[in-house]
Amino acid sequence: MRYLVIFIALGISFSTLAQRGDELLVYAVKGKVTAIQNNQETPVKVGKVLKPGTSIRTEKDARVTLVCRQGKPLLLNKEGVYPISRWRDSCRNTPGSVTSNYFQYVWTEMYKRSDDYKDDLDKNNNLAVVRGEDDKYADYPEGMTIVEFPPGMDTVNYTGVDLPLSWISYDYNGKYQFRIYTSKDRKLVFKDSIHANEIFVSRFSKKLKQGVSYAWTISAHANTGVIRRRILHYVSPEKRDAYIASISDAGELEEDSAAKYFRIAYLLEKKHYLAEAYSYYKKAAESDPEMPLYFDRLSAMRYEYRLFA
């Protein structure tokens, strides 16, 4: 029997915590930058949440990138003392852009891992756990094999860097029938019977052609049901490299190497370059092993897509 675990913050919801409009999060720092609050001055560090009433002191040649919870990054590169309230109107942002979505993600994820978040939870009681039966499979016929896929497996851009196409099947230990065919004219390219819940592209990569899109399916037995096909685009390394070059420059924003690698990884993942995204997540975690977000996302990629190289 499967259970759904729901976490509820007593007295304060996470959405409330994560959407306080006057708070700024420190994304990157170069040089000497301190935060002044309640007559106390402390060095700022990446992931620090600056609360209302805080001022920032920047020394000569210092630069700091701040992020509004709305997803807008702000650069401060002038010497002086600045109350964060001065950016209240500057945080207005056009929602829906890739940049906005990325920095909203960073704000939320870094905040969840910050001491400020933990302190807020402590002030408003701890998390309660409510258990309830997960009935997402209630409508499936008795005896049907349930197959699920990681969200990013719907579409994958393959560039010659090996990675597994994977899925999850509960309560089934038999063989799977894997088939891949051209997406346009549905010409069968490769098929195989396998025991594992994954198959590496290198198994059939010699049968693929750059610039061609393919569809792949799996089935377990007659009770698998209809499994929607997944798409595999064989993209040239040149096209991939051109995309990476287009997202590498952060413009005027201050950004250390770890933050840059993580941003590129996030955008690559959203663009369906899973193997390349994993590589950049590894670079981010190795460049700043003290940043929990980088390690957590790397671990999640390993678990979700079975990428361990």
Image: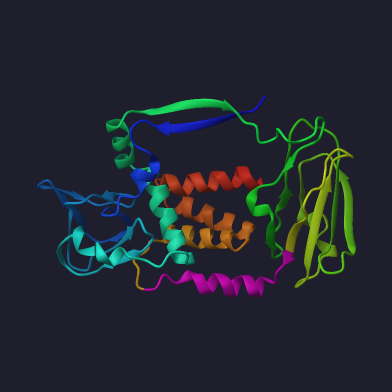
Q: Main secondary structure of the magenta part?
A: helix
In reply to whether residue 302 is colored magenta, the answer given is no
Q: Nearer the viewer, residue 67 or 136?
A: 136
Relative to residue 160, is residue 25 depicted above or below? above
Residue 302, percent from left and from top: 60, 45
Instruction: Locate the N terminus and report the quarter of the image it occupies.
Output: top right
- Is residue 270 in view? yes
- Is residue 308 in view? no
Q: Is residue 254 left or right of residue 148?
A: left
Quadrant of res 139 = top right
At x 52%, y 74%, the residue is 246
The magenta-colored residue range is 233-251
Relative to residue 131, is residue 164 depicted above or below? below
At x 40%, y 68%, the residue is 94
Q: Is residue 300 left or right of residue 14?
A: right
Residue 225, percent from left and from top: 83, 43
At x 56%, y 44%, the residue is 300
Residue 134, percent from left and from top: 62, 31
